[in-house]
Image: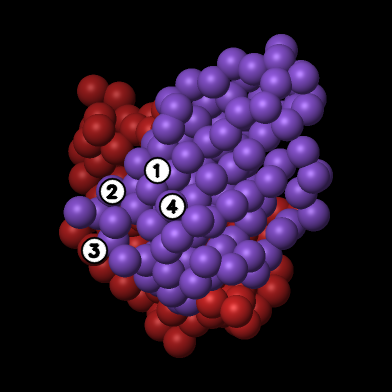
Chain colours: A purple, B red
Amino acid sequence: DTEVTQTPKHLVMGMTNKKSLKCEQHMGHRAMYWYKQKAKKPPELMFVYSYEKLSINESVPSRFSPECPNSSLLNLHLHALQPEDSALYLCASSRDRVYEQYFGPGTRLTVT
Amino acid sequence: SQQGEEDPQALSIQEGENATMNCSYKTSINNLQWYRQNSGRGLVHLILIRSNEREKHSGRLRVTLDTSKKSSSLLITASRAADTASYFCATDSGLTGGGNKLTFGTGTQLKVEL
């Protein structure tokens, strides 16, 4: 199984809502990532988890809160988002350092 | 800020022709990777070239890396309509705690017409 799954595929939320994005992989990968991608732009790294510990936070606002409950699962909790946070949120995983990353299909988020 | 700059930004070719995309980056790297993205969906890994390698092939793909010029190129031979996508280079600077930090280039939008 070389698949990374993400749910939901689409999400529309108001600025006062709390929602969560979910990402799952069963490849035994020990590193997992969240990226944000705006239209016609490259993905931008948000967070890196390695062996279930947060190893990188790219100065992401606190309204985005990542969580890694176990080695297969990665969540991104959203609260009090702004319209400019509307984007495609991509999850990825990799075996470890210096390996390719496997991406999920993304969650398209719209903040109204 | 983005590490990689790619050119051209957009490329339109006929099916059967070759497509070449270039990527330049600014700092030292562990490896450089190329990814394809179809129409705002997830990225698919194409090829990884390590900093001590100069050229790598995978099917119709050929990647070169020149660390002295901090540049890489991706050649797709005998292109097909299904190759229509955005192509990104990504540089890997490595992480001390595990995982790899990829910084993506600006991307090349390739359109292959029948």
Mark nearer the N terminus (2 vs 4)? 2
Q: Which residue is label 2 attached to?
A: A3
Q: Position of residue A97 (x, y in %)?
A: 48, 76
Task: State the CA–CA distance, disc 1 to disc 3.
Answer: 23 Å
Three-letter amino acid code of the residue under disc 2 = Glu
Mark nearer the N terminus (2 vs 1)? 2
| Viewer-side label of 1, 4 | 4
Task: State the CA–CA distance, disc 2 to disc 4.
Answer: 13 Å
> Secondary structure beneath disc 4?
strand
> Secondary structure beneath disc 2?
loop
**Badge 1: chain ID:** A
Within 10 Å of disc 3 (Cα), the crowding (few <14, some 14-19, many 20+) is few
| Viewer-side label of 1, 3 | 1
Q: Which residue is label 1 attached to?
A: A104
Q: Which residue is label 4 attached to?
A: A73
The quarter of the picture where the C terminus of chain A appears is top right
Residue name at image x 49 percent, y 72 percent: A51
Within 10 Å of disc 4 (Cα), the crowding (few <14, some 14-19, many 20+) is some
| Viewer-side label of 2, 4 | 4
> Secondary structure beneath disc 1?
loop
Task: State the CA–CA distance, disc 1 to disc 4.
Answer: 12 Å
Three-letter amino acid code of the residue under disc 1 = Gly
Q: Which residue is label 3 attached to?
A: B58
- Rendered position, B59 above or below A39: below
